[in-house]
Amino acid sequence: MGPGKDGNRRLRRLIAGNWKMYGRTADLGEALAVDEALTAGQGAAIDVIICPPATLLLPLAQMLEGRALRVGAQDCHTAPEGAHTGDISAEMLAEAGAAAVIVGHSERRADHGETDRQVRAKAEAAHRAGLMAIVCIGETLGQRQAGQTLAVVSRQLAASLPATATAANTVVAYEPVWAIGTGLTPSAGDVAEVHAGLRSDLVGRFGAEEGTSMRLLYGGSVKPGNAASLLAIANVDGALVGGASLKAVDFLAIVAACPAQ
Ligand code: PEP
């Protein structure tokens, strides 16, 4: 890790797949195919995680024990245990084999009314359980059109990251809500502007060393065809991939498009 030729610090990249509410036992073969390619050397210099639905977490983690591909979850409760029907704690996810958990995905913010405050508590719970928190933020189309993008994501970042966040236990994913699952992506200039703003916020809050070391992912319609250009943008340290993570061939093409550092 050190300053690259463009002056930005080069961090170990991370490509994370979010399967959302897709995937049955029969689909575990896709994850295994990804792992086989990684174990054979593809993407050896980057971190790769797949976050399947909770039902597949344990079997996938068992299949991948000691292998290259890591497993993550898509959400967690804030408490370690309790009377919370249907919820799963970060400790339970860790016991099932998760290394990371996505918190604050815009679909959870929209479907379940999750606030920044809850997202922050979930990230804190992830840290308590030893999981890496992948904290999602992003503006809506209306907010972008109103010129509020930088203010919105800066506010979300400040309110969604707990004091326990470090570069080792936290990754921030900038995901414009209007780009998720739509095939639309912001321009390279727009992504660069947002990521530069987030980087400066992180440095302001956590200091130069920690703030320049915390990885910033871009998410929203990352596909094999646009991955190389998105991943080449300054301060883009990887990607959070939804739809294109479901098929090994697509996901591996994105991994292959990711520069090592
Ligand atoms: C996501 O679910 O986080 C996501 C970015 O989805 P997609 O890649 O399908 O836009």
Image: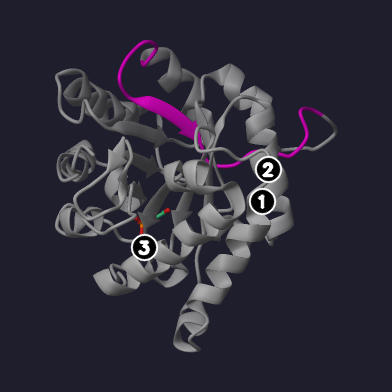
Q: Earlier in the sequence, mark 2 or mark 3?
A: 2
State how far apart marks 2 and 1 are (Cα). Answer: 5 Å
Residue 52 shows in the view: yes
Q: Nearer the viewer, residue 150 or 83?
A: 150
Q: Position of residue 70 (x, y in %)?
A: 39, 25
Left or right placement of residue 7 versus residue 242 in this view: left
Q: Position of residue 154 (x, y in %)?
A: 56, 66
Considering the numbered disc 3 on the image, is that residue within a helix, a strand or a loop? loop
Q: According to the image, label 2 marks what residue?
A: 122
Cβ of mark 3 under 8 Å from ligand 1: the answer is yes
Left or right placement of residue 240 versus residue 205 in this view: left
Q: Nearer the viewer, residue 240 or 204?
A: 204
Q: Nearer the viewer, residue 121 or 11?
A: 11
Considering the numbered disc 2 on the image, is that residue within a helix, a strand or a loop? helix
Considering the numbered disc 1 on the image, is that residue within a helix, a strand or a loop? helix
- Whether tag 2 and tag 1 are in contact, CB under 8 A, the answer is yes
State how far apart marks 1 and 3 are (Cα). Answer: 22 Å
Q: According to the image, label 1 marks what residue?
A: 119
| The magenta segment | 64-81
Give residue 23's mark.
Answer: none
Q: According to the image, label 3 marks what residue?
A: 181
Q: Looking at this rendering, what residue extends furthest in the right direction?
A: 83
| Type of the residue with mark 2 | Lys
